[in-house]
Image (cartoon, grey):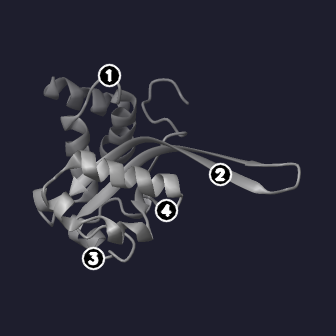
Amino acid sequence: MLDNTYDAPGINFGILISTDFQFIEDQVVKKNDLEAIKNQIDNILNNKNFYILDFSKIDGLTIDEILNHNKLQSKNAIIVIAYTEMSYTNIYNQKYIDINILSKIIINRNDLNKNTTIDKEVEKTLMNSYNSNNSRIVNCFLERYRYGSKDKVDKVLEKTN
């Protein structure tokens, strides 16, 4: 990682996609029961029945544009994750990928303007939960997808404090 930057190349962002999302009850999402949603997401992660769509593939799209592709995601929420990924090959030339979820960012359709872009919504959600435990992830996202430099991120953070 370069000095004077928040952008850590080892931190990835993406949308969690799974065929199991059809089993997430819409009522849970509509009630905004974050604990129940997180438990259902943990079940999906534990069952290893998921894919990750890289955030750069959807950056700048509106909430409705993303949710209109709801074959493999919840109808009422977008689950953005921050994660690390390690891949390695064993002595038998078998490739393994180990994914570690750092943060789950739940974007509830009911709370949104359908024309808002995903990057702005993720920023808003992250800023509402900004603390010392997630500052590295938030700063990385803000620099990479919203402001382009550490100095601009610092100015945004100064305004919110």
Residue at (41% x, 50% y) in the render: 42
Mark 1 surroundings: few (<14), some (14-19) or many (≥20) residues within 10 A: few
- Can you identify the residue that label 2 sits on? 97
Residue at (20% x, 59% y) in the render: 29
**C-alpha separation, residue under disc 3 versus residue under disc 1:** 35 Å
- Callout in the foreground (4, 1): 4
Q: Which of marks 4 and 2 is nearer the N terminus?
A: 4
- Callout in the foreground (1, 2): 2
Foreground residue among 38 and 89: 38
**C-alpha separation, residue under disc 4 versus residue under disc 2:** 13 Å
- Can you identify the residue that label 3 sits on? 68
Which SS class for mark 1?
loop
Left or right of 86: which side holds 25? Answer: left
Three-letter amino acid code at the position of disc 1:
Ser
Three-letter amino acid code at the position of disc 2:
Ile
Left or right of 74: which side holds 82? Answer: right
Total marks drawn? 4
- Can you identify the residue that label 1 sits on? 132
- Can you identify the residue that label 4 sits on? 50
Three-letter amino acid code at the position of disc 3:
Asn
